[in-house]
Amino acid sequence: MSTVEYHLEELAIAKSSTDARKALPPLPPCFASILDIGCGAGQTLLACNLHHDVLACGIDIDEEAVAFGHAQLDRERDGHLNLACAVGEALPFADASFEVVISRVAVPYMHIPTALAEISRVLTPGGHLWLTLHPYQMVFEFLGRALKAGNPKSTIYFCYALLNGVAFHLTGKQWRFPLNRKRCESFQTTAAMTRALRQAGFAQVEMEQNPHRFAIKAIKA
Ligand SMILES: C[S@@+](CC[C@H](N)C(=O)[O-])C[C@H]1O[C@@H](n2cnc3c(N)ncnc32)[C@H](O)[C@@H]1O
C-alpha cells in the first residue's frame, strides 16, 4: 500500500460512524488554532469537521502525503487546511502559536523528548495535547515477524526499536537508529510517557491504555 493509499484509508476510517478503529481527538468546546503533528495528508484534521474560523495546520515528514493533502484534501476545507513538510522535532512555528496540538500514531517515530519539548513550546499556556501511540506489543510483533521471515535488516531495526523502548522506560533517554540517523523508533510505556510529559512541562496527564489503544491527554502547565 502506498502512503497516499494509507492516508485515504485512514480518512475513510476517521469519517466512518461505525468503524471500531476510529480515534478522533476529544477537542475542547472552543479554540482558535490546532496543529496536527505527523498529519499525513491531513486526514484527522479533516475528519474533525472544524469550524472554518479555526486555524488548522498540519506537518509531516512525508512530502508525498503533504503534497497530496494540498492537491486533493484541501478542497474539502475550501483551502483552509494548512499543511507543511517538517519534522516533529523542529516545528516551524513561533512559541505559543496553538491552543490545541494533536498527533495520531506519529510520535512513536520521533525522538520523543525533543518532540514533546517542541509541542510544549508551540502550545499556549493551558493548551491541550492529545496523542495516540501504538500498543507497546507492536514492536515485539514486528520483531517476531522479521525473525520469522529471516529478514536481517528488519530484525536489526526492530531490535534497535525494542532496546530504545527499554532505554526510554528506564532512563527517559532515546537514541536515533545508528545506521540511519534520520530514523528514531521505540515502544512507549505509561511510566516513560508520564515522566517525559512532565519534563516537557505538561500537567493533568490522563492515559488510556489497552491492547488496541494508547491515548494520552495533557495540558500545558
Ligand atoms: C502511522 S502514520 C499516521 C498518520 C496520521 N496521523 C493518521 O493518524 O492517520 C505516521 C505519520 O508520521 C509521520 N512521521 C514519522 N516521523 C515523523 C517526524 N519525525 N516528523 C513528522 N512526521 C513524522 C509519517 O510520515 C506518517 O505520515
Image (cartoon, helix red, strand yellow):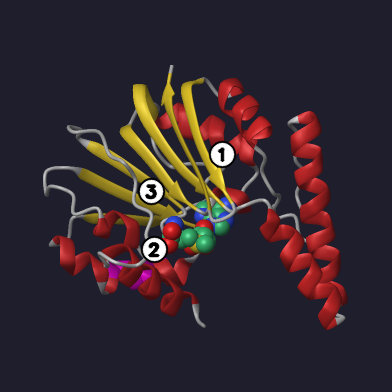
Q: Which residues are magenta?
A: 66-70
Asked if the residue at label 1 sits under 8 Å from ligand 1, the reply is yes
**Where residue 153 appears, x then y in whole percent?**
83, 73
The secondary structure type at the circle numbered 3 is strand
C-alpha separation, residue under disc 1 versus residue under disc 3: 13 Å
The question of residue 47 being in magenta is answered with no
Amino acid tagged 3: Asp
- Relative horizontal placement of residue 159, taking residue 114 as reference (left or right): right
C-alpha separation, residue under disc 3 versus residue under disc 2: 22 Å
**Where residue 187 appears, x then y in whole percent?**
69, 49
Please state which of residues 50 and 190 is positioned toward the viewer in this rendering: 190
Nearer-N-terminus badge (1/2): 2
Q: Main secondary structure of the magenta part?
A: helix
The secondary structure type at the circle numbered 2 is loop
The secondary structure type at the circle numbered 1 is helix
According to the image, label 1 marks what residue?
A: 115
Asked if the residue at label 3 sits under 8 Å from ligand 1, the reply is yes
Eye-nearest disc, 3 or 2:
2
Nearer-N-terminus badge (3/2): 2
Amino acid tagged 1: Ala
According to the image, label 2 marks what residue?
A: 20
- Relative horizontal placement of residue 109, taking residue 32 as reference (left or right): right
Which residue is pictured at 75% across the width and 37% down the height?
168
Give the number of the disc on residue 36: 3
